[in-house]
Image (cartoon, helix red, strand yellow):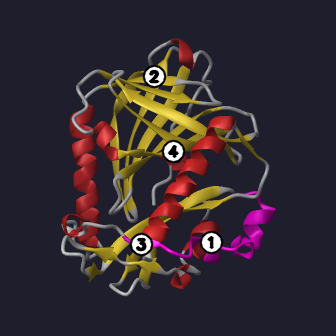
Amino acid sequence: MPVLVGLGMALAAQASVEASILEPVGRWSLDYGESGCLLARTYAAGSSKVLVGWRGIPFDDNYELVIQSAAKEEELRRGVVTVSVDRGRRSEALYRTFPLRGQSQRRLEARLESALFDGVEDGAIMSIAPSSDPAVSIRMLKAKDAFAALRRCGDETLVRWGMDPSERARVAFAPVWLNMGDVMKTDSYPRGAIEGGAVGSATVLLAVDAAGKVASCRVVLSSGTASLDAVACKHMPRARFSPARDALGRSIASHFSTRINWEMGGWHDDGPYRTLSAEKEREYQARRRTSVR
């Protein structure tokens, strides 16, 4: 899986990013990786540069937004980011930001609805406002074609994996994970990663059969640390789901993607993060109760 740190782009300091709109530097980059697709572009205003990337998530209605910029601070932060496109469509999501080991750079990660970027007009301004980090505004030149290419890349990747992209249309009700808290335990964290202070998130794609059992698992978005990726699927056979259903209510086999966050404590959670994460937990528990009736 291509990782943003491997793009070889030298990023300068992020001072005064809030004060101006960052313009694109160079062309869009679309990486057809072995485990997924990454759309990225570098943006700059004066000496301030950031790398902004969108990673497609198989069988999911979200993109993972990744912003990477130069910074030496070590604090681990979590908050809520508000993203708007030309002050029209907007979306809120949980985000986290952390330093990249040995890079003098920080990365912000958040999951946003892919529909936010459908039909983006040429020259649209995308504003990214994290609750506890500097805001960023970028000019989206030729973005409509770029996101169309990202969607095609996603479908072609599924075909390469022997999967059918049209599965989405057959699933009326997505599978619901019933025992989320029983799968990944504290002792799942690799000892070597703990000793090295490695943090990150890996997204896995599960094949869930019509009985709600996991038939297979593969990492589709890398955490950036090989040892974390290596154990991401190890415990997934324990997972149990209320299976997907078609329009007639029949149980069907499907796919389900989920993110595994590798964290060791020390995170600063702001007020908006605590509020929104509690709301999302209530929503999940409500779906879980409904699915087992």
Instruction: Tell me the mark number nearer the camera, choosing from 1 and 3.
Output: 3
Q: Position of residue 91 (x, y in %)?
A: 42, 36
* Label 2 secondary element: strand
| Residue at mark 2 | 137
* 10 Å crowding of disc 1: few (<14), some (14-19), many (20+): few
* Label 3 secondary element: helix
Instruction: Tell me the mark number nearer the camera, choosing from 4 and 3.
Output: 3
What residue range appears in magenta? 175-198
Instruction: Tell me the mark number nearer the camera, choosing from 1 and 2.
Output: 1
Which of the marked residues, 1 or 2, is nearer the chain's N terminus? Answer: 2
| Residue at mark 1 | 181
| Residue 221 visible in the shown view | no
* 10 Å crowding of disc 3: few (<14), some (14-19), many (20+): some
Q: CA distance from mark 1 to mark 4?
A: 22 Å
The amino acid sitting under disc 3 is: Ser
For residue 218, side relative to residue 73 (left or right): left
Which label number is shown at residue 291?
3
Instruction: Tell me the mark number nearer the camera, choosing from 4 and 2.
Output: 4
Q: CA distance from mark 1 to mark 2?
A: 37 Å
Quarter that holds the C terminus = bottom left
Residue appearing at x 44%, y 16% in the figure: 21
Residue situated in front as seen by the camera: 14 or 57: 57
| Residue 64 visible in the shown view | yes
* Label 4 secondary element: strand
